[in-house]
Image (cartoon, rainbow, N blue to C red):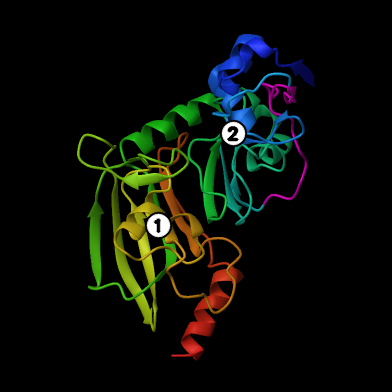
Amino acid sequence: MAVLTVVPQAAGTRLDRWLSDRLPELSRARLQALIVAGSVRVDGRVPKASYRLRGGERVDVEVPPPVAEELEPEPAELSIVHEDAEVLVVDKPAGMVVHPGAGQTRGTLAAIALAHAPAIAGVGGPRRPGIVHRLDKGTSGLLVLAKTRAAYESLVAQLATRAVTRRYLVVVHGHVPGDEGVIDKPIGRHPHDRVRMAVRPPGRGRRAVTRWRVLARFPRFTYLEASLETGRTHQIRVHLAFLGHPVVGDDVYGGRRQPPVPIPVDGYALHAATLAFVHPATGERVEFRSPLPARIARLLAHLRNTR
């Protein structure tokens, strides 16, 4: 904890700029993040980065310890669908984060997989051992991890060339017109919210292609199968929200204008049900399937019984 006192001559200076001069080892962006996180207090109050100092205040700055570069293994239950010397296919539950990030450092799939298969420590990044693609925290379903560097390179290349098949089951709000379709819209960072993604004008985002088809219709909801041709962050959620049919349970892209969901889904009503790729060692195409989890099956049963 750094305890600082504002001298009278600093009156009128922005808090973040003043802190940048006093704590040169921290970037201004890092300091602004600490202020937003509530780790900076001025006379006991949590200020904004733009707060103008008056002089004489006490400023407390709590700097969290740096995150360890190497990931610590965390033994825990892992739902394994397939495992051999090259790959590990798991069925991730909704609520589990794939790898450490902002606000989530413990209980990640990467740390659990590292405890299960310590050899993946040298595969990929140190904080993302074996991870070649990811699922959002609120999404459940199939994920493949590489156990060797050769497998990692093969799977990354297959993802880049769209040789990996990924099919999802999803319940969305509203009546989706038509029986099937393709959403081919670029996705990039939201222009006003860096945490979110958004459909962007040509040249402002990366190409993203999602195919969908209707599996069932209900009053106020539609059950779809969605297939990824590309793998952009939050792609299915962003694309379906762009169509006006956000994923059930998705408060980030769904907004508050949607009607209430009849029963909770404990995450997003989005499940990675099918995963297929060319096995890095055998060269044969392999396919894995995951049954619809109970949390989404309950929702569909309720919708069928209340038509």
- Tell me: residue 198, above or below residue 178: above
- Which label belongs to residue 167? 1
Q: Earlier in the sequence, mark 2 or mark 1?
A: 2
- Which label belongs to residue 24? none
State the residue in front, 138 or 255.
255
Residue that appears at 37% across and 36% down: 158
Q: Is residue 91 left or right of residue 61?
A: left
Residue that appears at 49% across and 35% down: 132
Residue 14: x and y in percent read 56, 22
Quarter of the picture containing the C terminus is bottom left
Secondary structure beneath disc 2? loop
- Tell me: residue 71, above or below residue 299: above
Quarter of the picture containing the N terminus is top right
Q: In this view, which residue lies farthest toward the left? A: 202
> Are the residues at dot 2 and dot 1 in contact (C-beta closer than 8 Å)?
no
State the residue in front, 45 or 89.
45
> Depth-wise, is mark 2 or mark 1 nearer the camera?
2
Secondary structure beneath disc 1? strand
> What range is drawn magenta here?
57-78
Residue 170: x and y in percent read 43, 65
State the residue in front, 55 or 132.
55
Residue 24: x and y in percent read 62, 9
- Near mark 1 (Cα within 10 A), the count class, few <14, some 14-19 or many ≥20, is many
Residue that appears at 22% across and 42% down: 201
Residue 285: x and y in percent read 40, 46
Q: Can residue 285 be seen?
A: no
Q: Can residue 49 be seen?
A: yes
Q: Which residue is mark 2?
A: 48
Q: Is residue 258 left or right of residue 76?
A: left
- Near mark 2 (Cα within 10 A), the count class, few <14, some 14-19 or many ≥20, is some
Residue type beneath disc 2: Lys
Q: Is residue 186 left or right of residue 48?
A: left
